[in-house]
Image (spheres, rainbow, N blue to C red):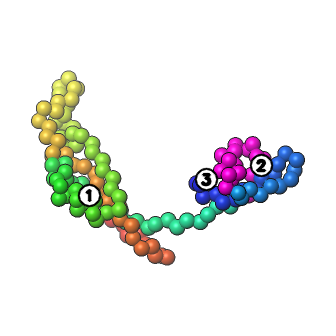
Amino acid sequence: VSDKVTAITVVKSDGNEKNITDEETLTAARVNLATFGVMVEIKMAVVTTPCATVDTIFPLVGECFTTTFMENLYSTNWSLELFWYPYNSIPLSNMLTSNGKLFTQDWNPEEDEIVLRKIKIRECTRTSTVKPS
């Protein structure tokens, strides 16, 4: 946020106000921790926030790490978030042995699901409605 600050007005110890707008002093004042005086006004640049559409899918590990699948994902999305929680293909009841230790001998990582969040930038509209899923 501090890099969006374009001007700062401070009250110095002598009671006078000082408007800081030159880049060198402004850079120091952004992180001054009150050494320049008490900040009484901060002007910030307005930036537009892009609108995005987010879609979450749950492909199997064995299906998604192919060249074709990955090239398609990267060419059609602005951003991707991928999460893998190992052993999610094994029911918990099958993972625990009688002594409470984990038993994962039959685990095949390619059968695990991953959480894949696809993010696309889209045109923003003034009004938008959220449809329940």
At which x and y percent is residue 38?
77, 48
In the rendered structure, which amino acid carries the disc numbered 3? Ser
Q: Is residue 73 above or below residue 12?
A: below
At which x and y percent is residue 100?
22, 26
At which x and y percent is residue 22?
70, 57
The residue under label 1 is 57
Tally of numbered discs:
3
The residue under label 2 is 38
Q: Residues within 10 Å of mark 2 (few under 14, many from 20)?
A: some
* Measured Cα–Cα span from mark 1 to mark 3: 36 Å
The residue sitting at 80% across, 55% down in the picture is 18
Closer to the chain start, of discs 2 and 1, is 2
Residue 128 appears anywhere in the view: no
Question: Which mark is nearer the camera, 1 or 3?
Answer: 3
Q: Which residues are magenta?
A: 23-41
Q: Secondary structure at mark 2?
A: strand
In the rendered structure, which amino acid carries the disc numbered 1? Ile
- The N terminus sits in image quarter: bottom right
Q: Secondary structure at mark 1?
A: strand
The residue under label 3 is 2
Residue 19 appears anywhere in the view: yes
* Measured Cα–Cα span from mark 2 to mark 1: 50 Å
Is residue 133 a member of the stretch shown in magenta? Answer: no
At which x and y percent is residue 61?
19, 48
Question: What label sits on residue 26 in the rendered view?
Answer: none
The residue sitting at 73% across, 44% down in the picture is 34
In the rendered structure, which amino acid carries the disc numbered 2? Val
Closer to the chain start, of discs 3 and 2, is 3
Indicate left or right for 91 with 130 as reference: left
Q: Secondary structure at mark 3?
A: helix
Closer to the chain start, of discs 1 and 3, is 3
